[in-house]
Image (cartoon, helix red, strand yellow):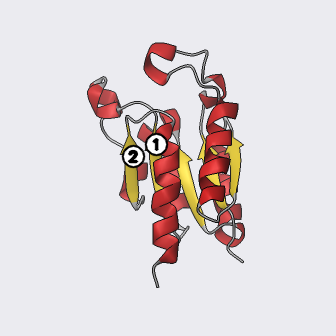
Amino acid sequence: MTLPVYVLNGPNLNLLGEREPHIYGHETLADVEARCERAASAVGLEARCFQSNHEGQLIDWVHEARKQASAIVINPAGLTFTSIALLDSLKAFDKPKMEVHISNPHARESYYHSSFISKTAHGVIAGLGPFGYECAIQAISQQLSKP
């Protein structure tokens, strides 16, 4: 039996659908989580979705995932550009990791251009809106099926 895929969402993503919909769209976090669950189920996986506005909570979930998950899909939101602590926790997770961003950070202000998290991610998906999560789960499925 394959362990679930942890889908971790960082600060302010609980406001999806309300906060800057011209950038992040109108889908809510619940909509994104439902997409993840459907995408995972379609490839024979289970998605467990988590969101926190607190860096330490995200780090605790990464630590938990070391024994409880087969992979991580993470949208670290603002922590992408600031959190060495989150980066270090992800370095300790030696299974597939995909970084997801709803918007394209490279098309935005320069302070969004450099991701700490990308230094440990197996792949980065940006600018595809919530569909990016589905792509990340498909990529995770391919990585998990490799011998």
When the figure is inspected, residue 44 is found, relative to residue 118, above or below; the finding is below
Task: Provide residue 97's location: percent of width, then percent of height.
Answer: 49, 60
Q: Is residue 116 left or right of residue 33?
A: left
Task: Provide residue 47's location: percent of width, then percent of height.
Answer: 67, 55
Q: Is residue 98 left or right of residue 42?
A: left
Task: Provide residue 30's location: percent of width, then percent of height.
Answer: 70, 33
Q: Would you say residue 91 is visible in this rendering? A: no
Quarter-of-image position of residue 41: bottom right
Residue at x 40% of width, y 62% of height: 122
Front in this rendered view, residue 84 or 79: 79
- Check disc 2: other Cα within 10 Å, few if <14, some if 14-19, many if 20+: some
Q: Which mark is residue 132?
A: 1
Numbered marks: total: 2
Task: Provide residue 69's location: percent of width, then percent of height.
Answer: 67, 66
Q: Helix, strand, or loop for circle 1?
A: helix
Query: Please, what is the three-letter code of the amino acid marked with disc 2?
Result: Ile
Q: Which residue is mark 2?
A: 125
Residue at x 61% of width, y 36% of height: 32
Front in this rendered view, residue 145 or 86: 145
Residues marked 1 and 2 touching at CB (< 8 Å):
yes
Q: Is residue 1 left or right of residue 88?
A: right
Q: Is residue 74 left or right of residue 135?
A: right
Front in this rendered view, residue 78 or 7: 7
When the figure is inspected, residue 69 is found, relative to residue 135, above or below; the finding is below
